[in-house]
Image (cartoon, rainbow, N blue to C red):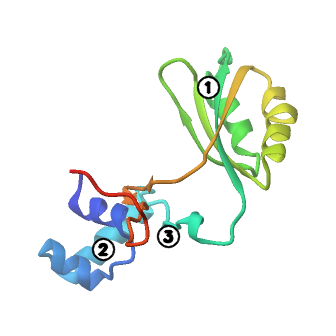
Amino acid sequence: MDKLLKILSQNSSFSNKELAMMLGEPEDYVAAQIKEYEQAGIIRGYRAIVDWNKTEDTDVRAMIELKVTPRKETGFDEIAAQILEFEEVTSMYLMAGSFDFAVFIKGRTMQDIASFVARKISCVDGVVATATHFMLQTYKVGGMNLLDFDEEDGRSLVL
């Protein structure tokens, strides 16, 4: 993987000057490379990694496994396009294995998520089975460890 892309994927808040120093390249070269990546659609956006456990956010998150029957002309893409339109969907992946899609969603309550699955997802033509898994604790996101071991925590780190 390109070193610049790797650094940006881990922390996109570095300035071009900082990136240039890390890579040993001129700052104008780094800026031009980033612009080229953005124009080519390789860099699709920039986001902060938020530890929602430390906020007032009370939303519930879940992963839904979907088994589907691919459509004759478009395969999985048309079904994916329909599901992506739901505002509750935060991420979606085509999978290999015992299910076809992993759909990550967010709702206000477990009931909202259950209703979403029953009234929207399961009604999409081609969906034959669902399994919902609620996320209870987030430990790592985007390569960033969110687990804190502080002094008041009675647990010990064992190496």
Q: Quadrant of residue 68?
A: top right
Q: Quadrant of residue 5?
A: bottom left
Q: Residue at 69%, 67% (x, y): give it.
A: 57
Q: Residue at 65%, 18% (x, y): give it.
A: 70
Q: State the residue position of label 2.
A: 32
Q: State the residue position of label 1.
A: 76
Q: Secondary structure at mark 3?
A: loop
Give the Cα separation between the discs numbered 3 and 2: 23 Å
Q: How many marks?
A: 3
**What residue occupies the far left of the structure in this picture?**
24
Q: Does the CB distance between marks 3 and 1 fall below 8 Å?
A: no
Q: Is residue 9 left or right of residue 83?
A: left
Q: Which of the pair 138/8 is nearer the observer?
A: 138
Give the Cα separation between the discs numbered 1 and 2: 36 Å
Give the Cα separation between the discs numbered 3 and 1: 30 Å
Q: Secondary structure at mark 2?
A: helix
Q: State the residue position of label 3.
A: 48
Q: Amino acid at mark 3?
A: Ala
Q: Secondary structure at mark 1?
A: loop
Relative to 28, residue 69 above or below: above
